[in-house]
Amino acid sequence: MKIVEHNRTKNEKFLTLENISHRYEESWVLNEITYTFENKKYVLMGPSGIGKSTLLHIACNILKSTYGKIETTHEIGCIFQTLNLLNDFTLRENIELAAKIKHKKPEYEEIAYLCGITKILDKYPNQVSGGQKQHAAITRALATGATFLIADEPTGNLDAESARIVRNLFDLLNRKLNIGWIVSSHDPAWLDIADEKLTLKSARLNTL
Ligand code: ADP
Ligand code: MG
């Protein structure tokens, strides 16, 4: 199958966090964060409890920040730690159902091919590996029109080899389809493929 290389210069899409602050009860997890994500590969590192998931959930618009706002020209695809694949449906049905809910015609053949799941599309989630589920969740996000991916610890529960394949896939999606992404992780291996390396410290976003 031929995969078209996209023109990386025509690329004005962005995701901006504007003065984002967030607190749970009395404790401030994020403090006045302003940052623009371009269409690039971002890795958000940092130990547990530092606020990575909070930041990503706000960026995905599934959590409303205490203060501040998000602006984006992207269709954001979110891949959470619990992948939310429906166990009674095959991977293909999961992908098609998600598209249907968004009133989109599912176009996933090329993406499924890139993600290496063409041969397992008719299997159920519990018949495939953790890495393959990640690939299916990525395919699902892209099949419903996502132009930017936000993934919270996509290799957190995977063995070293599956994690390597998932990292390679994220890299490939950027090279072949010009999909930008933010991935959170503890694993320094992500640093090798990131364009920008970020971390949270004292509720502020810093470059590593
Ligand atoms: P990370 O993803 O880096 O592990 P989180 O964003 O999940 O960090 O959490 C940041 C901090 O906010 C932690 O101290 C966590 O206990 C707290 N926290 C997260 N979610 C909630 C919540 N729903 N209610 C209260 N505290 C929370
Ligand atoms: Mg987290």
Image: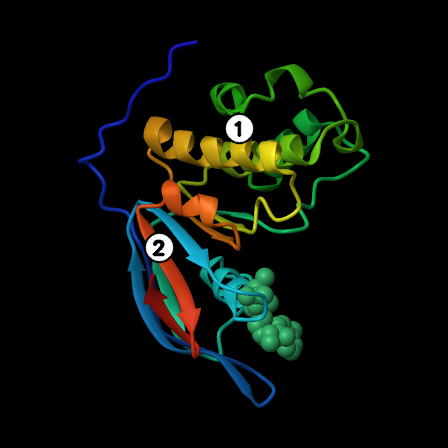
Tell us which disc is closer to us: 1 or 2. 2
Residue 179 is drawn in which quadrant? top left
Tell me where residue 97 appears, x and y as whole percent.
66, 34
Tell me where residue 55 appears, x and y as whole percent.
48, 65
- Residue 197's disc is 2
Tags 1 and 2 touching, CB below 8 Å: no
Against 25, is 191 above or below? above
Against 194, is 87 above or below? above
Label 1 C-beta lies within 8 Å of the nearest ligand 2 atom:
no
Residue displayed at 46% across by 50% down: 188
Residue at far left of view: 9
Q: Closer to the camera, 81 or 89?
A: 81
Instruction: Quadrant for the N terminus, please.
Output: top left
- Residue 105's disc is 1
- CA distance for labels 1 and 2: 35 Å
Q: Closer to the camera, 167 or 9?
A: 167
Disc with the residue nearer the chain's start (1 vs 2): 1
* Neighbours of disc 2 within 10 Å: few (<14), some (14-19), many (20+): some
Q: Closer to the camera, 192 or 184?
A: 192
Name which residue type carries label 1: Lys
Residue displayed at 36% across by 73% down: 33
Name which residue type carries label 2: Lys
